[in-house]
Each structure stands twice: as structure tokens, then as C-alpha cells.
Image (cartoon, rainbow, N blue to C red):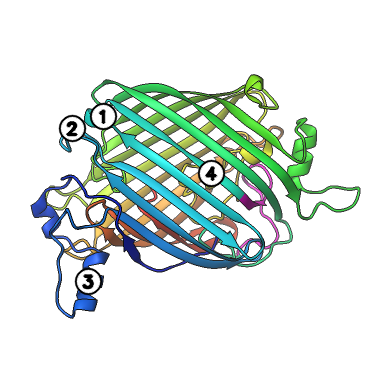
Amino acid sequence: MAYMVILCTGRLFAQDKQDSQDVLNKQTDAKDVISSFFSGRHHLDTNQKSHSNFSTLPSAGFNPSVGLAVGVTSTGGKTFGDPKTTTFSVVNANAYISTKGLASLEAKNNIFTNGDKLNIQGGIQFGKTVALDYGVGTGHKVQGDGTFALNDLPLANNADVFPIQYTYVKFTERVYFKLMDHIYAGGGVIFDVYSNIDDERKVGPKVNTHNYRYSVLNHFPTMGYSANGLLFNIEYNSRDHINRPEHGMYADVVLRSNERWLGSEHETWQLKTEFRKYWSLSKTNPAHLLAFWYWGSFLLNGTLPYLELPGTGSDAANRIGRAYTIGRFKGTSFIYSEAEYRYPITANKLLSGVAFVNIESASNSKNINLTEFIEPGEGVGLRLLFNKYTRSNLCIDYGMGNYGSKGIFLGLNEVF
């Protein structure tokens, strides 16, 4: 959805000491700037107890498939234990409603208990929304490529892109148990239920939409289906912070098994892998750094329903693939890699910048192999420190990719 954002903050709970007070006193965030503007004098908030740990971005936007939409995105955080041994926990939520009758609500959590003994990750989502269907695999241009995009959706209709409206309920929860320093293992459940699937351009006896053909060929109901299963996980996490890491590493391997006895149409085995690494380039200014992100999903056995195919925007925060619209590329298996250079602009950390490059590739079940066609992206971005106590920031990126793809991408908190 295309968003136009307005800054505001709200109160959720007090922050335990995470960054040193001396470091925080040298930083200025959006709340400090707003306070200075209304008070008429320079104001620097150095009171952690009075500072909000809850950040909110109201939004409004327009897209031909969605209509006029208004919504809100929020993030909050807290340390549930000794901050010297406990990772900062984060809760995110967002919602929107549009003039075309679409609506969505989701809440996600990444919680660490005292001493990082448990890591609980998951969320719930439900609503009625629209997906833009470009087909399966990479390496193919579509009519209308080059249309400017704002926050993951194009600003014009595309003759070769098929809007798919559907309602959905998604729930997932994983519990990781600490085995040793930075290493966790565990399991969980996932339920993805799709209903009232409507290919808006499916007319007449000859059906040309990718979604409909795929569902019929792979023996999925065309109006709705479920992909419910079990998750088996192992994780490594040495990041100093979730929202905006300055050093450390994160790796996650998830084996997913969709099961008929849980309601899935087909039994399926899927392997999901993720890796993130951060290298600070300065001891005196650790926000000056290089960051690397890899994300991959591999179909091991069985068949995935069409709306479950991994692709652009398929990560938990829907941020994969800046330069392309959500769903631009997808496949039975999908890999993505990105490198980012992050650097401070102002000494008080209020403004910083990024430069990024990324690549993605997707396969289909017939004639396109994984890595056969690589789709690159690149761009630059600006960061506004939104809340220095939670390291939340407003991200504004301009990205460019193949086939004339280009757009502005907005978000709350770093992409990875």
C-alpha cells in the first residue's frame, strides 16, 4: 500500500536501561525535535522513565487495487530482565482500512525472557486484502513494467498483473530454548487459512490468471485452502539490539511440515533459512557499519498453495526486495541477498543514511531453475531517529531494479 506518513508518539511502558545514559544524552530523536518546536527552546529528553517506548506512524495512501486507505503502524519494546544479559524485546502492530472494503490487522512479537532463557517469536494476522500476481519465477518482463511504486505497490494499473482479493487468518508461534550462549532450539505451529479467493480478471470459460491455473494444475481448491503445520527451529543470535543492531550476528533455520491432520490440502516439507551479520566500522561511532542479509525458502517435498509461494516481500516484516513491488517475483523456491552500508549524517544521530544493493531469484516447477535468472536492485535511503530509547527510526528509501522498476519505500525500523 502507498503510504504518506506523519510522525507522532504514544506512551506504552517505561524502558529499562539498555544503552548507557551518556550515549543517549548525546542523541536527539524526533520527540526531542517536536518538543523543541512547541516549547520554543532546545529540549533534550534525558529521562528514560518519562520517555515513551511506543512509536506510531499514521498512514494514508492510494492504489488502484486498494483504493484510498488509512492506517497506522506501531512498534514498542522492553527489556524483560537484566539489560546486561537480556536482549531487548519488540512488539509490532499495524492496521488499515480502505474505500474498496479491504482491511487488515496484525500484531507480531519477538520476546526474550530474563537472561535470554526463552525467545518467543510469532504473531497473528487477519483481514481482507489484495495481492498483485505477476506469475511464477524470475527472468520475465510484464507489460507496464517501469510504473513508479510507492511503498511496495504500483501507482497505476498493469494489464499483465492480476489482482487477487482474498480473506485470511494467519497465526504462528515459535518458542526457542537457550542451549548455550547465543544458541537456541525449539518448535512451534503455523496456521495460514485463505478463503473467498477472487481473481478479479478471471472472466469467461478461458481462465488466464496465474493463480487459477496453478491451483487447478496442483489440485488446490480455487476459492480457498489452508496451509497448517509444525515448525522445528534452531537459531543463533548475538545482535546487540533487534531494531537497529550495531554489531553481532543472527541465523535461523526453520523446517516446516504442512500436515493434512492439521487441515492442510497437501503434505509439504519446506526449509527456510536466514542469516544477518553486522560489522561496525568505528569504535567511537558504531552506527557507521556494514550489514548483510540472506533469506531463502526451499521446497523439499510436496506442493505449496499459490498464495504461500515465497517471494518479494515474503519475510516477516514484508521488506524483502526494495526496488520491486510486493509479489513481483515468487516461486516454489526463492533466495534473496542484500548488503547495506549505514552511516551517520548528524553527530546527534538524528539523521543517518544508507546505500544498498540486493539480488533475488525464484524457480518454478517447470522450466525456471533457482539462480537461473537473477533480479538485482539498488538504492539509497534516509533514516530519522524516531525513538532513541528503542532505536526505532523512520526509513525512507529510493530503489531501482530491472525492467525499469523504481519506487519509494517507507517503513518503521531498519529493513534488517
Q: Which mark is residue 35?
A: 3
Answer left or right for 87 relative to 71.
left
Q: Which mark is residue 85?
A: 2
Label 1 vs 3, first from the N-terminus: 3
Cβ atoms under marks 4 and 1 closer than 8 Å = no
Label 2 vs 1, first from the N-terminus: 2
Label 2 is placed on what type of residue?
A: Thr
The residue singled out by tag 4 in the image is: 125
The residue singled out by tag 1 in the image is: 116
Label 1 is placed on what type of residue?
A: Asp
Instruction: Measure the C-alpha gap from mark 4 to mark 2.
Output: 31 Å
Q: Is residue 197 on the magenta stretch? A: no
Label 4 is placed on what type of residue?
A: Gln
Label 4 vs 2, first from the N-terminus: 2
* 322 w.r.t. 336: above or below: below
- Across and down, in percent, residue 354 comes to 33, 57
Cβ atoms under marks 3 and 2 closer than 8 Å = no
* 341 w.r.t. 3: above or below: above
Q: Quadrant of the N terminus?
A: bottom right
Cβ atoms under marks 1 and 3 closer than 8 Å = no
Q: Nearer the viewer, mark 1 or mark 3?
A: 3
Question: Callout 4: few (<14), some (14-19), or many (20+) C-alpha neighbours within 10 Å?
Answer: some
Give SS at disc 4: strand
Cβ atoms under marks 2 and 1 closer than 8 Å = yes
Q: Nearer the viewer, mark 3 or mark 2?
A: 3
- Across and down, in percent, residue 221 comes to 77, 35
Label 3 is placed on what type of residue?
A: Ser
Give SS at disc 1: helix
Question: Callout 3: few (<14), some (14-19), or many (20+) C-alpha neighbours within 10 Å?
Answer: some
Question: Start and end of the magenta stretch?
Answer: 128-146
The quadrant holding residue 386 is bottom left
> 64 or 127: nearer the eye?
127
